Image (cartoon, grey):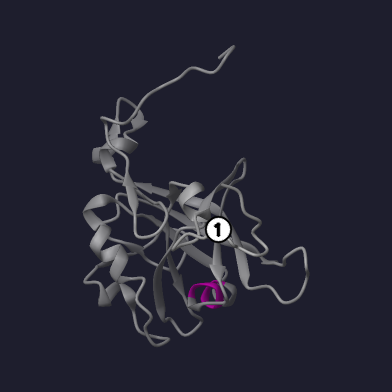
């Protein structure tokens, strides 16, 4: 099968693009408005993009509350979405009126961050405190107004639950982080699926 994305004439019930580019980490983003309103929402177009300095980015379809709030206060937090919090993560994707706290809507408690004002999810096993760097409108080859916006942040603080630091290493698989696949599907990292490979020369 081959299809051109311009016409998207793949003949399938759903676009396979996101099923192929998977699994994708979930950026479970906490943002705070200038008024102090809290927004918590999951973004599957998310990843680390740099190590020195440590930077992350997420892409939003339109300027949703998270993007607007981040541009107002220049800060945000990326909470680790894990299997035990999958239902709460999903609840925070609900479309709610601006100003409604998704964290409270999902029955989650907030914990104070150390270096930024937006709180982290208290039950999250890890969180990245970020300072906003820039927002990049993602314009297409054809030009026109952007429909997606890429938010880039520099990580200034990292929280990790001490129970998951084993022999000096973060036991990522034990946290069971979840990642988005296509359609309604997700993957979960486990000890059973973890494997190690040493790079050539390393």
Instruction: Tell me residue 102's x, y (percent).
Output: 33, 75
- Farthest top residue in view: 201
Q: Is residue 83 magenta-colored?
A: no
Relative to 119, does residue 22 appear above or below in the rendering? above
Residue for point 56% across, 61% down? 131
Which residue is labeled 1 in the image? 10
Instruction: Tell me residue 91's x, y (percent).
Output: 29, 70
> Mostly what secondary structure, the magenta segment?
helix
Q: Quadrant of residue 99?
A: bottom left
Residue for point 26% across, 58% down? 86
Q: Quadrant of residue 182?
A: bottom left
Mark 1: give few (<14), some (14-19) or many (20+) Cα within 10 Å.
some
Relative to 26, does residue 177 appear above or below in the rendering? above
- Segment colored magenta: 66-70
Kindly state the secondary structure of the residue where label 1 is placed: loop
Q: Nearer the viewer, residue 56 or 186?
A: 186
Q: Nearer the viewer, residue 202 or 145?
A: 145
Relative to 13, does residue 32 appear above or below in the rendering? below
- Relative placement, left or right, of 106 versus 92 is left
- Relative placement, left or right, of 162 versus 139 is left
Q: Is residue 68 magenta-colored?
A: yes
Q: Quadrant of residue 143?
A: bottom right
Instruction: Tell me residue 82's x, y (percent).
Output: 29, 51
């Amino acid at each position: 099968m081959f299809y051109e994305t311009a016409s998207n004439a793949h003949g399938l019930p759903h676009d396979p693009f996101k099923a192929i580019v998977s699994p994708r980490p979930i950026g479970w983003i906490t943002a705070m408005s200038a008024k102090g309103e809290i927004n918590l929402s999951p973004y599957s177009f998310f990843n680390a993009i740099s190590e020195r300095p440590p930077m992350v980015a997420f892409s939003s379809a339109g300027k949703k509350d998270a993007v607007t709030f981040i541009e107002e206060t220049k800060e945000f937090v990326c909470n680790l979405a894990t299997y035990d919090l999958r239902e709460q993560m999903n609840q925070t994707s609900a479309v709610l009126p601006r100003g409604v706290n998704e964290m409270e809507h999902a029955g989650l408690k907030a914990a104070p961050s150390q270096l930024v004002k937006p709180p982290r999810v208290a039950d999250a096993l890890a969180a990245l405190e970020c300072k906003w760097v820039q927002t990049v409108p993602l314009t297409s080859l054809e030009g026109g107004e952007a429909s997606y916006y890429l938010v880039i942040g520099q990580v200034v603080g990292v929280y990790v639950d001490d129970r998951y630091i084993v022999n000096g290493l973060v036991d990522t698989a034990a946290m069971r982080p979840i990642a988005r696949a296509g359609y309604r599907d997700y993957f979960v990292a486990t000890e059973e699926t973890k494997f190690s490979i040493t790079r050539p020369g390393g």
